Image (cartoon, helix red, strand yellow):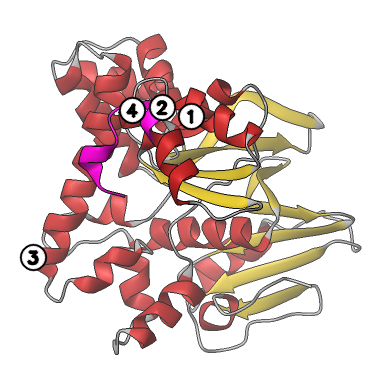
Amino acid sequence: MVTEQIQTWQDIVSYVESNKRSGFCYVFLDEVQEIDEWQSACKTLRLRDCSVFITGSNSKLLSKEFTQELSGRYVSFRVRPFVYKEILEYAKELGRDISISDYLIWGGFPKRLEFQGEEELRIYLNDLDKTIVENDIINRYKIVKSDVFRKVASYTLISNSRIYSAKAISDYMKGNNLSCTSNTVQKWIFYLDEAYIIDQVDRYSQKAKKVLENSHKLYNCDVAMNSIRCTNNRYDITHNLENIVYNELIYMGYKVSVYDNNGREIDFLAENGNYRYFIQVAYSVAEDKTYQREMSAFKGLNQIDTKILITNDDIDYSTSNVKHIKLKDFLLMDTLE
């Protein structure tokens, strides 16, 4: 489609009508939000035997919000960055090798594979980060304290795989001479969630037998959002590993929550139908102290549900009650069954 030809939503309809063949038609519109009243074009095309696919995300077409413009006549798909299997396959097409260590640091944004050196890669990822934070959120919500928001966003994204407290973040900002209330932090966290930059994962308490309100763990859409904020190659591999396991479980189709086992936190409860999996994640349990800590989290759970330990170790640490899955094997699995 020639950009100069399309100035109004009527132009979109006219272009499709003049170029489509007879019968049912599939129409793909990218960044259609740049056209005023774009939703009118979508509705009109739907009435004219067209199936319309919309892609894009920016300050005018943001995450879940754009679907409100289509009056319920839509099916929404969230397109996430690649998981390891996908980026491994794409890397092979490009004649490149991607190690697990590389994936733990730089994640699954596909276009990153087009950059050879780390300097170029960082420029791309920083530009992507800036576009999402500034265009998709600051401009969309007209955030006045933009500098403070950037600080909160950076603090949040480098704190992935952790339980967060809006008050704690607010206090941290105040300690750095930045005024920001806990209510404002909570609102900004919501904006990050709405833009699919982070996921807020519920915490379930075994003791209270309910989901803990206003208590969530945060995971980044991609671990690169953490890594670009690290300096001197001091990457947060431990928390990135947990984040990656979360992303892989979501890709597999599991409903995921964080489980409080009477004061002992289990990283994930993954559920699919009648299947439940309690999962602990650690980079290594080679040291006895770490092994005991991770295994003790399963104490008191019933014998019916499967307990899984995922680590980067090559040694098999499985027991009669806990199945150890090596990270290199887990990343190639399609299901936990």
Decide which of tag 3 and tag 2 comes sooner along the chain: 2
Which mark is nearer the camera, 3 or 2? Answer: 2
Q: For numbered disc 3, what is the local secondary structure?
A: helix
Label pair 1/4, CB-CB below 8 angstroms: yes
**In x, y percent, where is residue 201?**
58, 39
Label pair 2/1, CB-CB below 8 angstroms: yes
User: Distance of mark 3 from mark 4, alpha carbons?
Assistant: 36 Å
Which quarter of the image is occupied by the C terminus?
Answer: bottom right
Decide which of tag 2 and tag 1 comes sooner along the chain: 2
Q: Is residue 19 above or below residue 285?
A: above
**In x, y percent, where is residue 140?**
31, 20
Q: Which mark is residue 35?
A: 4
Decide which of tag 1 and tag 4 comes sooner along the chain: 4
Q: Amino acid at mark 1?
A: Ala
Which segment is the magenta one? 1-11
Residue under label 1: 41
Q: Amino acid at mark 2?
A: Gln
Q: Residues within 10 Å of mark 4 (few under 14, many from 20)?
A: some
**In x, y percent, where is residue 102?**
31, 74
Q: For numbered disc 4, what is the local secondary structure?
A: loop
Which mark is nearer the camera, 1 or 4? Answer: 1
Residue under label 2: 10
Instruction: Tell me if 228 is positioned left or right of 265 in this view.
Output: left
Residue in the image at 72% along x and 30% along y:
211
User: Distance of mark 1 from mark 4, alpha carbons?
Assistant: 10 Å
Query: Is residue 275 on the magenta stretch?
Result: no
User: Distance of mark 1 from mark 3, alpha carbons?
Assistant: 42 Å
Toward which corner of the image does residue 213 lie, by quadrant?
Answer: top right
Residue in the image at 37% along x and 23% along y:
168
Q: Which mark is residue 199?
A: none
Q: Is residue 249 above or below residue 152?
A: below
Residue 162 seen in the figure: no
